[in-house]
Amino acid sequence: MNATARRLVCILLLVTAAPVAAHADGFVAPEKDRCVKKGRTAVAVNKQVRVYSTDGETQYFGCSRATGRSARLWAQDGVYRFGNLVRLTDRFVVFSVDSVPACKADCPPGVTASSFTALVDVPAKKFERLAETSLERVLLTRKGSAAWLTGRDQAVDLHVRTRSTPGVKDSGAITALSLKGTTLTYRKDGVEKLLTLP
């Protein structure tokens, strides 16, 4: 092997041996987290998104770690409006908000408290309401399909949100909801059932 061939072999070995910041899911992590800035307090973080608060934990945002672009999630004042991070999966954030009118117990008829739960695709800044209630648990696939339960005892509804089939998928005595990959598992009347999400 001549000197030129030996140099080519060494270069190839160096290239193939170089470390790459990649993960099992195929997402290449940014070399620098562009969401880390002064005045931001981290709430939750994964490979793609950092959820943070500002202004004394009154404003909450989701930030794409690759681009540094933020999407506003919710605001709270600790008196009349409260927010809660429900789920962070890949690029998606689910949060809930509960609002109490300023009149509280002295409100006129028809003025009541309100709640909602929302799904946000952080890099795309797409916001979608999942429910007009404050959900404590929502399961998410990596593509943003969501599932949750409402109701109690024998009257439980299984809700599924996908791009093509949002709505109630099953009802009854439903328990033990879980998600592995895209396979949703639950029990209805003691019988295990499976549902595949996109």
Image: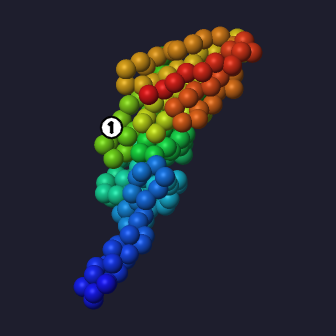
Q: Nearer the viewer, residue 103 or 61?
A: 61
On screen, residue 69 versus residue 47, left or right, reads left
Label 1 element class: strand
Q: Looking at the rendering, in which quadrant would you find the C terminus?
A: top left
On screen, residue 128 versus residue 82, left or right, reads left
Residue in the image at 69% along x and 26% along y: 176
Q: Nearer the viewer, residue 111 or 68?
A: 68
Q: Is residue 108 above or below residue 72?
A: above
Residue in the image at 64% along x and 18% along y: 193
Q: Is residue 196 visible?
A: yes
How far across and how far down the image is residue 141, in percent? Answer: 49, 35
How far across and how far down the image is residue 119, in percent? Answer: 43, 35
Q: Is residue 50 above or below residue 179?
A: below
How far across and how far down the image is residue 43, in percent? Answer: 52, 54
Q: Is residue 34 above or below residue 169?
A: below
Residue in the image at 42% along x and 72% along y: 17
How far across and how far down the image is residue 166, in percent? Answer: 43, 19
